[in-house]
Image: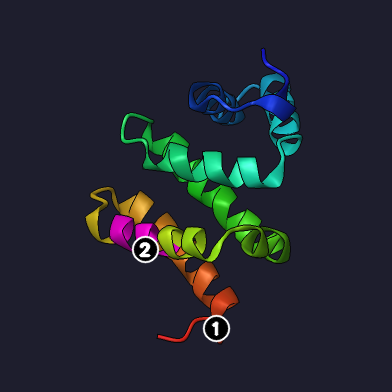
Amino acid sequence: MHNSKTMTSLQDFNNLITRMLFPENEARKEAEKQYENIELLTKAQLLFQLFMDQNAGVETRSLCLVLMRRILSNRWDELWPAWSKENQQQFCEQLLKSATEEQNAVLRKRLTDVIAEVARSTIGIFSF
């Protein structure tokens, strides 16, 4: 397995997230440990990319959104300012677009949770 600090392959990340879904405790705990060691910006980027990958399983995509919401909730002050204004806008636009186009009800619910977290944290930041 690659060093989790240098994990950049979406396929490697997909495998890691899949292992985090394993019912077997040892494998899941090892995957969770590797996940925690990934740098914040890389982790957020990979989570969103994997969610956007229509070839990934629904459970994997759902977990990506749960973990993304957790990052936005717990580490907003680190993540949001590290993104350029353009990246922030693209992220918000893609979230909204995905919420309107997603066919799976579970994923739509997870998307609305992420959107609500962004909205809660950006009240007063954006002026349209």
Work out whether mark 2 precedes mark 1 in sequence or the reverse, and give the earlier one.
2
Task: Say which quarter of the image contains residue 69.
Answer: bottom right
- Residue that appears at 54% across and 44% down: 45
Q: Name the amino acid, label 1.
A: Ile
- Residue that appears at 34% across and 56% down: 108
**Residue 94 inside the magenta-drawn segment:** yes
* Left or right for 73, reference 47: right
Q: Secondary structure at mark 2?
A: helix
- Residue sitting nearer the eye, 10 or 23: 10
Indicate the quadrant containing the N terminus: top left, top right, bottom left or bottom right: top right
Cα separation between marks 2 and 1 = 16 Å
Badge number at residue 123: 1
Query: What is the number of callouts on the image?
Result: 2
- Residue that appears at 59% across and 25% down: 16
Which secondary structure type mostly characterizes the magenta part of the structure? helix
Q: Secondary structure at mark 1?
A: loop
Looking at the picture, how far across and down is residue 95, in whole percent?
A: 39, 59
Answer few, some or many: residues within 10 Å of disc 1's Cα (few below 14, many 20 plus, some between 14 and 19). Answer: few
Q: Name the amino acid, label 2.
A: Glu
- Residue that appears at 30% across and 53% down: 105
Badge number at residue 93: 2
Residue 1, compared with residue 112, is above or below; it is: above
Q: Which residues are magenta?
A: 92-99
Residue at the top extreme of this rendering: 1
Looking at the picture, how far across and down is residue 34, in whole percent?
A: 72, 28
